[in-house]
């Protein structure tokens, strides 16, 4: 039986991964444009999304361990 909470967490993780991919694509596309005071081709948002994804992954692992579900 599918666990709704686990499905929700996995959906959020997929959405975050999609956002990270989009941010990386945008950063690469604008790498040739000058950014005063900041390195071109780098997104400051990607590390934030990575940390958020790491926390979400830990939450998924904790949920699976506590509820023994595999939704």
Image (spheres, rainbow, N blue to C red):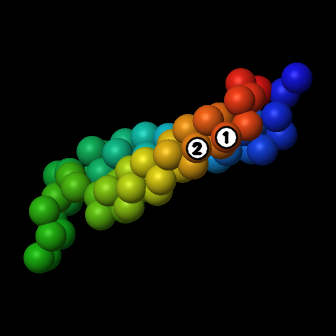
Left or right, 62 with respect to 5, comes to left
Residue holding disc 1: 66
Q: Secondary structure at mark 2?
A: helix
In whole angstroms, how far apart are the C-alphas of marks 1 and 2?
6 Å
Q: Is residue 66 left or right of residue 58?
A: right
Farthest right residue in view: 1
Residue placed at 35% from the left, 45% from the top? Answer: 24
Instruction: Tell me the residue that label 2 is attached to.
Output: 62
| In the image, residue 18 above or below residue 44 | above
Residue at the image point whose x is 21% and y is 52% from the top? 41
Q: Quadrant of the C terminus?
A: top right
**Residue 15: x %, y % from top left:** 60, 44
Indicate the quadrant containing the N terminus: top left, top right, bottom left or bottom right.
top right
Query: Of 42 and 48, which appears nearest the observer?
Result: 48
Quadrant of residue 4 within the rendered picture: top right
Q: Is residue 25 visible?
A: yes
Q: Where is residue 37 shown, x and y percent of the image?
A: 11, 76
Q: Name the residue at 71% across, 29% down.
A: 68
């Amino acid at each position: 039986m599918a666990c709704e909470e686990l499905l929700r967490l996995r959906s959020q993780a997929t959405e975050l991964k999609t956002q990270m991919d989009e941010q990386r694509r945008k950063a690469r596309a604008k790498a040739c444009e000058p950014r005063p005071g900041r390195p071109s081709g780098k997104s400051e948002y990607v590390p934030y999304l990575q940390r958020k994804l790491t926390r979400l992954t830990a939450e998924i692992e904790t949920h699976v361990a506590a509820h023994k579900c595999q939704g």
